[in-house]
Amino acid sequence: MSRRRARKQAFLTLYQSDVTGVGLDSILARWRHYKGDLEEYAEELARGVERDRLDLDERIGEAAEGWKIGRMNSVDRTIMRLALYEMINAPDVPQEVAVNEAVELAKGFSSEEAPGFVGGVLRGAGRELIGHG
């Protein structure tokens, strides 16, 4: 299993849920119908992000000084939720790996400025997590 592939799958399902307002269960069912099974890690990430979304949004909002989560574009918001969830809940994934993977997703799916924004916010949130912020 490729964790990079799983992260991309989780991002795509979470993004679709965010922009359509359709629940994750329906999105995952549609994914399976058209594309087959997701990586197990992708579903674990997506369900975790959905479950912890309010907490993740609060933490992202605190780290993104001057930016409210609702003002962020859906792509960046989804990428940051996913990475922050992994930073908090995947002890085998170093924080900087989660940040770097998020930056790569931002390079592929968002604006030219997004990788710097995403990386900066996540690094700030990471400092808060380990008590050095």
Image (cartoon, rainbow, N blue to C red):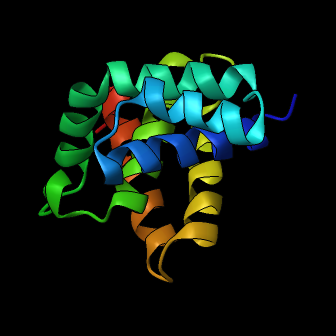
> Is residue 97 something that shows in the picture?
no
- Identify the residue at horizontal 46%, vertical 41% (top origin): 14
Tally of marks: 0
Above or below — where is 2 with respect to 99? above
Residue at the extreme front of the image, as rendered: 33
User: Residue 113: percent from the left, percent from the top?
Assistant: 44, 80
Above or below — where is 116 with respect to 76? below
**Depth check, front residue: 9 or 130:** 9
Residue at the extreme right of the image, as rendered: 1
| Quadrant of image for the C terminus | top left
Q: Is residue 1 left or right of residue 43?
A: right
- Identify the residue at horizontal 65%, vertical 29% (top origin): 42
**Depth check, front residue: 91 or 56:** 56
User: Residue 122: percent from the left, percent from the top?
Assistant: 41, 48
Above or below — where is 112 with respect to 34? below
| Quadrant of image for the N terminus | top right
User: Residue 103: percent from the left, percent from the top?
Assistant: 58, 60
> Is residue 76 something that shows in the picture?
yes
Q: Is residue 101 left or right of residue 117?
A: right
- Identify the residue at horizontal 65%, vertical 49% (top origin): 101
**Depth check, front residue: 117 or 10:** 10
Q: Is residue 22 left or right of residue 42?
A: left
Q: Is residue 20 left or right of residue 102?
A: left
- Identify the residue at horizontal 50%, vertical 17% (top origin): 89
